[in-house]
């Protein structure tokens, strides 16, 4: 059953955390010229915004009321030129904010990508891919939004209010003080509303993604639902969801509708105070009236125009909680320390050729469930080791330890007589060639994927490698040959073809140690023979470990290890182990019998037998 995707709808319970906010803001430090640029332009634009209202007052008082045509023209000309300056500064700050946002997104993503490459496999085991993807995409966006548009709206809002108060003070400071008292009231009311509205909309989105999930399950599982007669129960569950959504949607709509009239009423009260004050002054201070008609009009404009920046600031404040939570998750990723780090004196031995030794190795993924305990193994340079045994026995773990994707918890692994933790990880991993059971190919062409083994290889070398492992024939049969796209993860090719390409890639890399996890199923007999031949090319003269599923590999191996419960339960060559008539003998005869009967069935009725991986040697 599919799970609804809810990464976007995570809970944001984080409270304001000054340290995280400081760290988020610190992301702008390398780009301070942009920041200074956009803040200065915003300051200019907001100053002009308020100044325009002041100029309007002067147009009314000095031009229209005083009937002074020259003054009117002069002020209107100033107004017009400043409008052009304002237009330029608005263009400038929006442009700079956009650029700053892109830089911050780029920086964060690059930092995360770099860090993700350093993290050990253990981190990837614990952390779902979806979680990481959410950090890299939506969280980065939220943080970038906060430090750009959020910062822009806040500074623009604050500066607008400050300059408006400044000009009101110039016009009539008593009234300016009275009117300013309204500002914090509107700010608090606006923040409370916005916070509540955001909570309701988030609830709506969350339920919506559950509804999508419910639709998905019902449609994909329609047969089962019908067969079990679950329609009524499903409908009831669905009705709960939709009525929850209706309630949350209703509350959001009600709050949104209530919000604007409420703040408008508060500002209307302020406008009332202004008008009352003007009238009162006219009464008590006949002849000495300090607030002109233009002044009153300017005050009313300042109060009304203040509403918009206050709303924007309230929105930013309410959304800041989300951005802080996003920031915390991004930093938790960036602060995760790799479990495997090179020692300060780590070196590159130049080669990994030499005997390999596991000495008293203990290993676990989870502390309370040991996988290997006191594991000992000596492998001579050039030996081919086949690992067989039941699933979960520890075969992949042995190979993972050898590649140093994990390190022993106790004991030591030596390569060429040296503890391998003295080498750099790169020195080890770049000299081990690995072909996985379901090999991973990267989107691109077949040629690109083979060349991944050695980036400076020529086209001829790429083809030569493919020929050596027997992949050339199938590649040239494809319409575009080596230039055929493999699709995301190589999914346009079969498992066998992917293995052949991985073998060619490994040949090109010319590793000192070769590791192969054979494909268990879905490989036809011809491809299987090709893979076998390719493996032999690669194993020649190289120490090789094969997690073996096929009889042919096992017969040719120098030594076969039967791995059960993290220990070697049997070890020897194919004929030795058969003579011993133990676990290996049973696995082998079972598989041999199955293969015989399949071959017989094919001969009799020409049908393709279904694979029975349950009986394979290493599953
Ligand atoms: N990443 C992991 N985190 C936790 N436990 C793990 C992890 N990988 C393997 N294990 C556990 O370690 C044990 C050995 O697993 P391992 O994959 O080495 O066995 P295997 O012999 O290769 O099996 P298979 O043939 O199925 O691949 C199993 O019990 C498995 O559940």
Image (tube, helix red, strand yellow):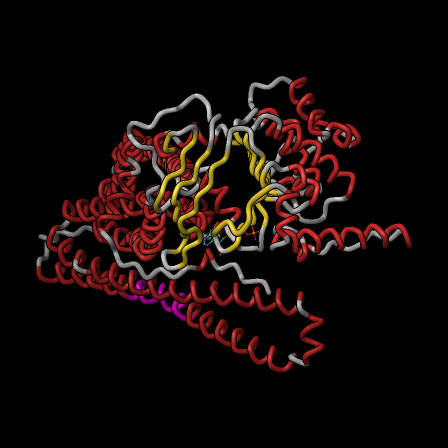
* 54 relative to 614 in the view: left or right: left
* Range drawn in magenta: 254-265
Whether 554 is drawn above or below 510: the answer is: below
58 lies above or below 589: above
Residue 230 in which image quadrant: bottom right
Can you give x and y, in whole percent of width and height, for residue 562 in the image?
A: 56, 49
Left or right: residue 335 versus residue 607 is left
Please name the predominant secondary structure of the magenta segment in the image.
Answer: helix
Q: Residue at x 65, y 47 (%)?
A: 549
Coordinates of residue 14 in the picture (x, y in percent): 30, 58
Instruction: Residue at 86%, 51% (x, y): give it.
Output: 602
Q: In this orientation, which residue lies closer to the viewer: 601 or 24?
A: 601
Give x and y (percent) for residue 32: 28, 31
* The magenta stretch spans residue 279: no
Q: Position of residue 186 (x, y in %)?
A: 25, 61
Q: Is residue 160 left or right of residue 511?
A: left
Q: Nearer the viewer, residue 607 or 239?
A: 607
């Amino acid at each position: 059953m599919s799970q609804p995707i809810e990464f976007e709808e995570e809970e944001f319970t984080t409270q304001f955390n000054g340290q995280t906010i400081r760290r988020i803001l610190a992301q702008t430090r390398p780009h301070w010229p942009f920041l200074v640029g956009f803040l200065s332009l915003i300051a200019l634009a907001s100053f002009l915004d308020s100044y325009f209202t002041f100029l309007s007052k002067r147009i009314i008082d000095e031009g229209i009321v005083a009937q002074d045509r020259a003054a009117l023209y002069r002020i209107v000309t100033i107004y017009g030129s400043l409008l052009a300056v304002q237009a330029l500064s608005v263009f400038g700050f929006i442009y700079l904010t956009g650029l700053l946002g892109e830089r911050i997104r780029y920086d964060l993503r690059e930092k995360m990508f770099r860090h993700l490459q350093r993290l050990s496999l253990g981190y990837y085991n614990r952390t779902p891919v979806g979680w990481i993807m959410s950090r890299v995409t939506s969280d980065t966006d939220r943080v970038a939004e906060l430090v750009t548009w959020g910062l822009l709206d806040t500074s623009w809002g604050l500066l607008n209010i400050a300059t408006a108060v400044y000009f009101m003070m110039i016009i009539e400071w008593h009234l300016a003080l009275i009117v300013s008292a309204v500002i914090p009231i509107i700010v608090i009311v606006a923040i409370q509303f916005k916070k509540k509205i955001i909570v309701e909309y988030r609830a709506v989105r969350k339920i919506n993604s559950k509804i999508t999930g419910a639709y998905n399950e019902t449609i994909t599982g329609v047969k089962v639902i019908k067969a079990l007669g679950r329609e009524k129960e499903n409908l009831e569950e669905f009705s709960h969801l939709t009525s929850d959504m209706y309630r949350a949607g209703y509350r959001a709509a009600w709050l949104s509708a209530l919000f604007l009239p409420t703040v408008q009423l508060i500002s209307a009260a302020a406008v009332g105070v202004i008008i009352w004050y003007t009238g009162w002054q006219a009464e008590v201070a006949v002849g000495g009236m300090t607030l002109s008609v233009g002044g009153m009009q300017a005050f009313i404009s300042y109060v009304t125009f203040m509403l918009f920046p206050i709303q924007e600031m309230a929105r930013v404040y309410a959304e800041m909680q989300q951005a802080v939570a996003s920031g915390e998750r991004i930093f938790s990723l960036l602060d995760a320390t790799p479990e495997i780090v090179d020692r300060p004196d780590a070196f590159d031995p130049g080669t990994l050729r030499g005997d390999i030794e596991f000495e008293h190795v203990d290993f676990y993924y989870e502390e309370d469930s040991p996988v290997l305990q006191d594991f000992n193994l000596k492998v001579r340079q050039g030996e081919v080791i086949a690992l067989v045994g039941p699933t979960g026995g520890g075969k992949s773990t042995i190979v993972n330890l050898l590649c140093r994707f994990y390190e022993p918890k106790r004991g030591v692994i030596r390569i060429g007589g040296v503890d391998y933790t003295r080498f750099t990880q790169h020195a080890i991993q770049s000299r081990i060639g690995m072909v996985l059971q379901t090999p991973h190919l990267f989107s691109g062409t077949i040629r690109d994927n083979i060349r991944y083994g050695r980036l400076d290889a020529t086209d001829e070398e790429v083809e030569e490698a493919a020929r050596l492992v027997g992949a050339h024939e199938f590649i040239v049969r494809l319409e575009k040959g080596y230039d055929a796209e493999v699709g995301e993860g190589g999914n346009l090719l079969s498992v066998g073809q992917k293995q052949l390409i991985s073998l060619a890639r490994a040949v090109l890399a010319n590793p000192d140690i070769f590791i192969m996890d054979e494909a268990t199923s879905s490989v036809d007999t011809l491809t299987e023979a090709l893979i076998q031949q390719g493996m032999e090319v690669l194993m020649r003269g190289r120490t090789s470990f094969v997690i073996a599923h096929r009889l042919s590999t096992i017969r040719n191996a120098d030594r076969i290890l039967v791995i059960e419960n993290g220990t070697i339960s049997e070890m020897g060559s194919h004929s030795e182990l058969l003579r011993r008539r133990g676990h290996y003998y049973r696995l082998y005869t079972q598989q041999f019998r199955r293969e015989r009967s399949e071959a017989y069935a094919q001969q009799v009725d020409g049908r393709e037998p279904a694979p029975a991986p349950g009986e394979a040697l290493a599953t």
